[in-house]
């Protein structure tokens, strides 16, 4: 069952915020995201759309099966991708205002309405940044879904940094033969023993065809991501600066470290109309328990339809 978060706390106003550049400012330049789409049989491409924003080193293809299932069960369009990942443009800066601006630009360009916005990990911080912006049209978002991340400021974990360093090492090896993926996996084995995590990290490896003069490389721009590590660890807002009062769901991995008793109150302060669901997983909630995760998200979105029709 979804657990409602207590609303008995002071409400905060954006009037007390520090000077912060809105994601709608002309100084924040969005990129044109490439994206996957899953359209329901009735041809609806805009109304009630679910937009998925994946995490660091992710790829829209990682969400393909879930995207199809969401579209089928909810009978609504589903879209996904992110800057500096997959086939979207490589661009700096890689900070949350720009990532949020990309998503907002995408929503407006496609004319999406009554949007449900879902973000995992780094993508979760991006969608929270979007929702908290005081220039956001009040009727744009219907539901906000954050997956296993909190709106905290800190350092990116040493484990994540070791992943990026290992991917750079793989590119430096200039692998080109049929064993490239196997050799790359050996490098990753030095920093990650779990085979499913290594498979995830290798999901964006591009291996050249036989006879090509090119070398194996990753779809993600590793130099940009390395430079962005400080920005990825932070968050644009401090507690008490602003709130998003729309419907919000936080899905936490029960074995994960990113959402805990220390930072959960901060999440609740930013998102007073929120609920929390805990699944028996680590950080990659959607990959470890895809069916359970799907059901939680579908039930939450459907409950917004029920409240509208009541």
Image (cartoon, rainbow, N blue to C red):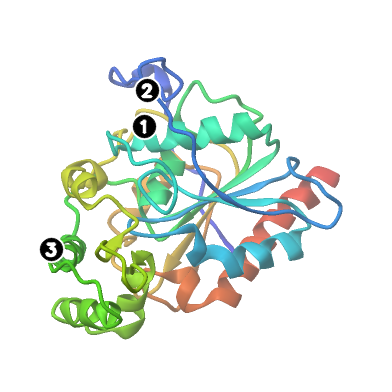
Which quadrant would residue 299 be assigned to in this image?
A: bottom right
Question: Marks 1/2: CA distance?
Answer: 7 Å
- Percent x, y of residue 75: 78, 57
- The front one of 94 and 308 is 94
Secondary structure beneath label 2: loop
Residue 239: which numbered mark, if any?
A: none
Q: Residue at (51%, 77%) from the top-left corner?
A: 289
Q: Is residue 1 visible?
A: no
Q: Quadrant of the N terminus?
A: bottom right
Q: Residues within 10 Å of mark 2 (few under 14, many from 20)?
A: some
Circles 1 and 3: CB atoms closer than 8 Å:
no
Q: Residue at (78%, 56%) from the top-left corner?
A: 40
Q: Which residue is mark 1?
A: 97
Q: Is residue 304 left or right of residue 185?
A: right
Closer to us: mark 2 or mark 3?
3
Q: Which residue is mark 2?
A: 28
Q: Which residue is mark 3?
A: 172
Q: Residue at (85%, 46%) from the top-left corner?
A: 309
Circles 1 and 2: CB atoms closer than 8 Å:
yes
Q: Is residue 66 above or below residue 109?
A: below
Q: Residues within 10 Å of mark 3 (few under 14, many from 20)?
A: few
- Percent x, y of residue 32: 49, 34
Question: Marks 2/3: CA distance?
Answer: 33 Å
- Specify which label sits upstream in the sequence, 2 or 3: 2
Which quadrant would residue 180 be assigned to in this image?
A: bottom left
Which quadrant would residue 217 be assigned to in this image?
A: bottom left
Closer to us: mark 1 or mark 2?
2
- Specify which label sits upstream in the sequence, 1 or 2: 2
Q: Is residue 228 visible?
A: yes
Secondary structure beneath label 1: helix
Question: Marks 1/3: CA distance?
Answer: 32 Å
């Amino acid at each position: 069952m979804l657990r409602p978060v207590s609303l008995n706390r002071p409400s905060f106003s954006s009037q007390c915020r520090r000077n912060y550049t809105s994601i709608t400012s002309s100084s924040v330049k969005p990129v044109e995201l490439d994206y996957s789409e899953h359209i329901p049989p009735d041809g609806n491409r805009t109304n009630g759309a679910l937009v998925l924003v994946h995490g660091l080193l992710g790829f829209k293809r990682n969400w393909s099966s879930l995207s199809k299932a969401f579209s089928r069960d909810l009978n609504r369009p589903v879209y996904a991708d992110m800057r500096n990942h997959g086939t979207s443009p490589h661009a700096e800066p890689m900070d949350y205002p720009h990532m949020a601006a990309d998503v907002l630009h995408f929503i407006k360009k496609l004319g999406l309405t009554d949007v449900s916005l879902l973000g995992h990990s780094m993508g979760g911080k991006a969608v929270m940044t979007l929702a908290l912006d005081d220039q956001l049209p009040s009727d744009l978002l219907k539901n906000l879904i954050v997956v296993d991340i909190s709106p905290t400021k800190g350092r990116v974990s040493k484990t994540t940094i070791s992943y990026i360093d290992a991917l750079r090492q793989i590119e430096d090896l200039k692998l080109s033969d049929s064993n490239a993926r196997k050799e790359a996996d050996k490098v990753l084995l030095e920093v990650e023993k779990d085979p499913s995590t290594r498979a995830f990290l290798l999901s964006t490896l591009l291996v050249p065809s036989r006879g090509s003069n090119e070398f194996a490389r990753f779809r993600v721009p590793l130099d940009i991501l390395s430079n962005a590590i400080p920005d990825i660890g932070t968050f644009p807002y401090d507690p008490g600066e602003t709130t998003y009062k729309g419907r919000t769901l936080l899905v936490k991995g029960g074995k994960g470290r990113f959402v805990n008793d220390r930072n959960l109150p901060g999440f609740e302060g930013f998102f007073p109309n929120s609920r929390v669901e805990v699944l028996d997983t680590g950080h990659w909630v959607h990959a470890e328990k895809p069916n359970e995760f799907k059901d939680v998200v579908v039930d939450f979105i459907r409950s917004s339809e029920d409240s509208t029709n009541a």
